[in-house]
Amino acid sequence: MDALNCDLKGKKCVPCEGGTPPLTEKELEPYLPQVPDWRVEGGRALAREFKFKDFAAALVFINQLGAIAEAEGHHPDINLHDWNRVKLTLTTHAVGGLSENDFILAFKINALKK
């Protein structure tokens, strides 16, 4: 995979087809620096936890990321817990692991917290 094609800025999620293989560990490498604070879990998912000042701020964030996810057609698992923490998990079910879409969405979600 060409490193130039791995720049996430300005990219949009595209529909995935079954039978497409998930990204390999080597293919993940150029994406990881672009999504700080996200970690690969089990080689099949990206995860990050966000902490907020209160429950209301966590809900605002969830609604903002929900709008982005819906526009991209790629949806994270969302877990609001301990009243002010949101854990997000991204994976591409159609490929059985990680795809570029997961990194694109993580990149866009990170932009919400700046």
Image (cartoon, rainbow, N blue to C red):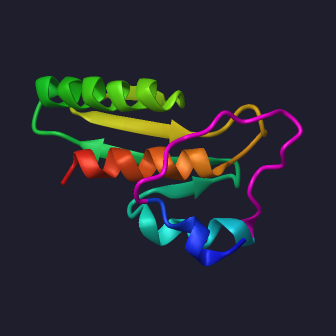
Q: Is residue 27 magenta?
A: no
Q: Whole-percent x and y of residue 102?
A: 56, 46
Q: Nearer the viewer, residue 41 or 35?
A: 35
Question: In which quarter of the view is residue 68 placed?
Answer: top left
Q: Whole-percent x and y of residue 47?
A: 50, 47
Q: Is residue 46 above or below residue 28?
A: above
**Whether residue 82 is visible:** no
Q: Whole-percent x and y of residue 7?
A: 50, 66
Screen quadrant of the N terminus: bottom right
Residue at 53% in and 27% down: 73
Q: Is residue 11 magenta?
A: yes
Image check: 44 left or right of 3?
right
**Whether residue 13 is visible:** yes
Q: Whole-percent x and y of residue 87?
A: 40, 38
**Number of numbered discs:** 0
Residue at 11% in and 31% down: 54
> Overall secondary structure of the magenta stretch?
loop
Image check: 41 left or right of 61?
right
Image check: 18 left or right of 106?
right
Q: Which residues are magenta?
A: 9-25
Q: Nearer the viewer, residue 11 or 53?
A: 11
Residue at 46% in and 71% down: 33
Residue at 69% in and 52% down: 42
